[in-house]
């Protein structure tokens, strides 16, 4: 298992967590088994914006004995009174639901209490005016919630909530389709979406990735907006390469889904390679470094993706990025302009030219 450290909270988070969306449909034995298997193999992060109420019972049975090892995202606004997922900003309903979810999970605290599923300014207004945000903050003050999170599909609104300084964790939909402006939740331009990821990285806000497969559409050539299927491992690697991302949360239906997701760590680099995206990415994505490092190896020994990442973050005012760049053994100024990376970049970035730009920036 690979772990990534949350810069604000200090938590070590498994790079693959559990998206619980469809697992409620499994039998009790299968559902409990999937959670137990994941924990045994080092998964320690679970999101509970699930599609059905039984999920909480399954997780409670499987994980209560190892609760201190786990990190839970619980959503203040997800409503399961009917047995299926619903969304609400009605305060008393939120209170009842949070209390019920904690009892089912057999826990007396929540690691990340989430401002749930805000996609329009009216959602954010209702969340505050109805007292739900105050309730969440009260629970944090009392120690029942450790950190505040936000789930959204809209970069502009996510940015507005992040401006409050309340949020330590963002749950956001990241996949090649949405980032290329294809799909139901492909909100914001490619540039706006990447700016959001970079902002989170610069501010130490962790990103947990929902919908890494675009609801399964990317896995089928017939439904993929690119006209060809991608694999789960390509999509997971794509998300993990984005700034700020700590964990990817594939939705699991059963134990086999969990085993398949964790097979990512045994997969070869070729199985994770998503450079094919460069052959059909739209124009506003082409020419932009996505830090994939498919241009490697560099004959001069540069980590081209990391140099680009630190540069983009430093321009946003991230002092840590500038410091990290300064500690690199090989810097942009060591580029010999051989053109190797230009020829290999699947997204058609003029990397040799960009290395000159980056070198000039860091000697100012």
Image: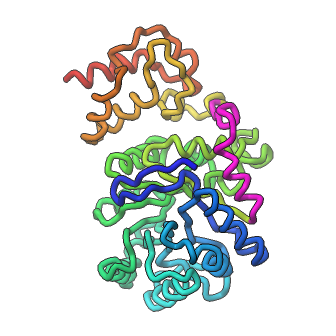
How far from the left and from the top, in percent, is residue 108? 45, 83
Task: List x then y, in percent, for residue 203.
Answer: 32, 51
Q: Residue furthest left?
A: 364
What residue is shown at x 61% (from left), y 62% (from top)? 18
The residue shown at (52%, 73%) is 67
**Residue 337 makes an appearance in the image:** yes
Assign the magenta stretch its main secondary structure. Answer: helix
At 48% from the left edge and 33% from the top edge, which residue is drawn?
291
Q: Is residue 228 above or below residue 61?
A: above
Residue sitting at x 43%, y 20%: 302
- The image shows residue 307, relative to residue 130, as above or below, that is above
Looking at the picture, does residue 140 appear above or below residue 148?
below
Q: Is residue 279 left or right of residue 73?
A: right
Tally the numbered discs: 0
Where residue 282 sits: x, y (%)?
A: 58, 34
User: Which quadrant of the figure contains the C terminus?
Assistant: top left
Return the residue nearer the eye: 186 or 314: 314
Relative image position of residue 190 (x, y in whole percent): 49, 42
User: Which of the 4 quarters of the picture holds residue 133?
Assistant: bottom left
Colouring scheme, one of rainbow, by chain, secondary structure, one colour:
rainbow
The relative height of residue 207 versus residue 222 in the rendered view (above or below) is below
Q: Is residue 186 visible?
A: no
Residue 270 inside the magenta-drawn segment? yes
Range shown magenta? 254-275
Q: Decide if residue 315 is on the left or right side of residue 210.
A: left
Residue nearest the observer in this picture, 66 or 210 = 66
Within the magenta stretch, is there residue 232? no
From the viewer's perspective, tell me whether residue 360 is left or right of residue 258. left
């Amino acid at each position: 298992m690979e772990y990534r450290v949350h810069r604000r909270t200090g938590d070590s988070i498994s790079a693959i967590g559990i998206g619980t969306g469809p697992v409620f449909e499994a039998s009790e034995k299968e559902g409990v088994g999937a959670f137990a298997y994941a924990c045994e193999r080092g998964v320690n992060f679970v999101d509970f914006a699930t599609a059905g109420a039984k999920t909480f019972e399954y997780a409670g049975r499987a994980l209560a004995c190892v609760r201190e090892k786990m990190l839970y995202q619980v959503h203040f606004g997800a409503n399961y009174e009917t047995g299926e997922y619903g969304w609400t900003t009605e305060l008393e309903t939120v209170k009842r639901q949070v209390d019920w979810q904690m009892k089912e999970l057999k826990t007396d605290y929540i690691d990340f209490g989430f401002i749930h599923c805000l996609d329009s300014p009216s959602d954010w207004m209702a969340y505050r005016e109805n007292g739900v945000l105050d309730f969440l903050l009260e629970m944090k003050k009392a120690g029942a919630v450790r950190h505040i999170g936000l789930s959204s599909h809209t970069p502009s609104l996510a940015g507005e909530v992040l401006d409050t300084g309340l949020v330590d964790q963002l749950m956001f939909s990241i996949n090649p389709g949405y980032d290329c402006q294809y799909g139901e939740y492909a909100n914001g331009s490619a540039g706006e979406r990447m700016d959001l990821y970079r902002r989170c990285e610069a501010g130490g806000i962790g990103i947990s990735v929902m919908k890494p497969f675009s609801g399964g559409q990317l896995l089928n050539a017939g439904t993929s907006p690119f006209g060809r299927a991608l694999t789960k491992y390509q999509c997971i690697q794509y998300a993990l390469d984005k700034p700020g991302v700590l964990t990817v949360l594939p939705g699991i239906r059963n134990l086999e889904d969990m085993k398949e997701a964790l097979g990512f760590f045994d997969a070869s680099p070729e199985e994770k390679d998503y450079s094919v995206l460069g052959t059909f990415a739209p124009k506003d994505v082409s020419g932009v470094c996505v830090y994939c490092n498919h241009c490697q190896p560099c004959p001069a020994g540069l980590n081209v993706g990391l140099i680009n990442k630190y540069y983009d973050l430093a321009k946003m005012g991230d002092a840590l990025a500038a410091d990290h760049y300064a500690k690199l053994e090989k810097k942009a100024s060591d580029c010999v302009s051989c053109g190797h990376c230009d020829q290999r970049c699947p997204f058609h970035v003029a990397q040799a030219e960009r290395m000159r730009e980056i070198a000039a920036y860091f000697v100012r």
